Amino acid sequence: MSYGRSVEVVETAENVRRITITVNGERRVVEVEPRLLLAHLMREGLGLTGTHFGCDTTNCGACTVLFDGEPIKSCTMLAVQADGHEVTSVEGLGTHSELDPVQEGFQAEHGLQCGFCTPGMMMASKALLNRNASPTEEDVRWALSGNLCRCTGYQNIVKAVLWAADKQRLSGPAAAGDTSSEEHVS
Amino acid sequence: MYPSKFGYEAPRSLDELSSLLNRYGDDAKILAGGQSLVPMMKLRFAAPEVLVDINGIPGLDYHREDPDGTLRVGALCRHVTLERSALLAAKHPLMAAAAPLIADPMVRSRGTMVGSICHSDPQGDWASVLLALGGHMVALGPRGRRTIAAGHFSLGPFQNALQPDEIALEAVIPAPTGQRSGTYLKLERRVGDFATAGVAMALETSDGRVVRAGIALTGVGPSNIAATEAAQALVGKPLSEESIEQAAQLAAAAAQPRGDHRGSAAFKRHVVATFIRRGLARGEAVAA
Ligand SMILES: Cc1cc2nc3c(=O)[nH]c(=O)nc-3n(C[C@H](O)[C@H](O)[C@H](O)COP(=O)(O)OP(=O)(O)OC[C@H]3O[C@@H](n4cnc5c(N)ncnc54)[C@H](O)[C@@H]3O)c2cc1C
Ligand code: FES
Ligand code: FES
């Protein structure tokens, strides 16, 4: 594993912190300046460009990642605050051969057009499904109320998440029972 | 956008925090949920020399009741914890109504009630809730703890009564003297927006009479407004159409709204009166 790129985002050697974070299940040790935002660390430091900057003002949710399982806006957290914590980004949802039900749902129900909001939408959806295996349409709209989309009109996004919930209930590891587990699946 | 440079400290205990605040004084700013402070630092509206991140201090994320029914909400209790709280759902109707109306789910994952009150944004919802419930803040500093009543905590927009070496340890809601009811009504342009107008209503009734009432307004003045006269109009008698109407008029008069992109001053006053009528008419239904 190379940490070289992470070090590159640091502007000066002074005031640099070494932090350890678990990103998509993998332990990473990176050096960051305190003012580096988590979204910058993800994109430029770790090369995980699935996390998008939309507004950069805490409004749009395109930068949503899971932080210890809870959805947060990574443009509004300092990277240094992630020391000792777990971060899951859209890259941690599935693999090329096996998509997460949320990703499959967006594909099946045409939940995206330009795709810019999609990673954030998916992470907020994932957070919902991890807590609530059988959400209603209202639950989905509520969970996505901090994510803006300029293209789809939201209808198909909501359908995509409901599709994913069905799929996960019928075939996923949760099929054995209706889990309301707080556990964070990456 | 990057914040300007700052030193970063992450104390692991209240003692460590206290010596850091002592050392840095005015140069330091406390970082709680960061959902107001980080955006302000990115826009360079705030540029503290040193950021003191309290998120690593254990034991501050509580919300719990004392045996006598006093509710305490710790400095790291997040909006989302209050939104999901069974305790609030069962016994604190006003707080339970307000929690899900703060910002959006991602902001609620991080932001804290205490941080919101410290921030003293006149659009902040929690300060109205604390005012209506007659609560107070507990500050901790080198001279020990002191209590600051909700009505004295905010000194104006983005200014609070804390000394630079003090932290707000918890928000405290006193035990009720009667059966609690109440709610929070908020008009927002879209989900997650700050209030065009918000009204916090807290009642306590005993033997069919209102024994305590609190009403506070969000977003219709230079700070959150305690509509004391409106609340007083409800006390000492059963809740009636007349007393509710009186409270609605008095609350609208207590509002000091300014017309802006969210609506005209007259519209906001109208919303305040309407919310009082709706919220109190619903009062019985939302009793805990
Ligand atoms: C998109 C968006 C929408 C929002 N919508 C709403 C809304 O509808 N209603 C609403 O009420 N709020 C809203 N907010 C604000 C949100 O509730 C913040 O969480 C809150 O205002 C600040 O809490 P925090 O814990 O994030 O504090 P921080 O941002 O960490 O701190 C805010 C200020 O308080 C100080 N501070 C924090 N904690 C303490 C403490 N324990 N002791 C002393 N000082 C302290 C900090 O130094 C700083 O000056 C919104 C924010 C965003 C980004
Ligand atoms: S980029 Fe973070 S909320 Fe828009
Ligand atoms: S698909 Fe384009 S912003 Fe949502």
Image: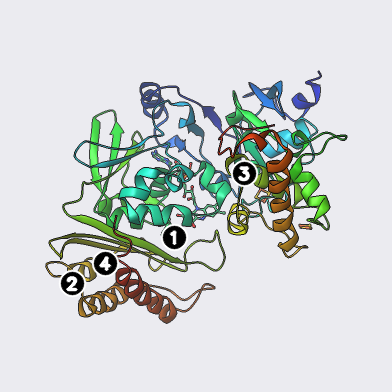
Q: Which residue, given by chain and number where applicable, does mark 4 sit on?
A: B227
- Check the residue under mark 3 and report the chain it is in: A
Residue B208, by quadrant, is bottom left
**Label located before the other in sequence (1 or 2):** 1
**Amino acid marked by disc 4:** Ala
How much space separates mark 3 and mark 4, taking CA atoms? 43 Å
Q: Which-is-in-front pick, marks 3 and 2?
A: 3
SS of the residue at dot 4? loop
Q: Which residue, given by chain and number where applicable, does mark 2 sit on?
A: B233
How much space separates mark 1 and mark 3, taking CA atoms? 35 Å
- Rendered image: mark on residue B123: 1
Q: How many marks?
A: 4
For the question of whether residue A8 can be seen, the reply is: yes
Do marks 3 and 2 share a chain? no
Do marks 3 and 4 share a chain? no
- Check the residue under mark 2 and report the chain it is in: B
At x 83% / y 56%, what residue is drawn?
A114
CB under 8 Å between discs 1 and 2? no
At x 61% / y 29%, what residue is drawn?
A82
CB under 8 Å between discs 3 and 2? no
Measuring from the top left, give residue B266's x and y in whole percent: 41, 81
Q: Which-is-in-front pick, marks 2 and 4?
A: 2
Instruction: Kindly tell me whether mark 1's CB lies below 8 Å from ligand 1.
Output: yes
**Amino acid marked by disc 2:** Ala
**Label located before the other in sequence (2 or 4):** 4
Q: Which-is-in-front pick, marks 1 and 2?
A: 2
Residue B64, by quadrant, is top left
Above-or-below relation of B286 to A186: below
How much space separates mark 1 and mark 2, taking CA atoms? 25 Å
Depth order, front residue of A151/B227? A151
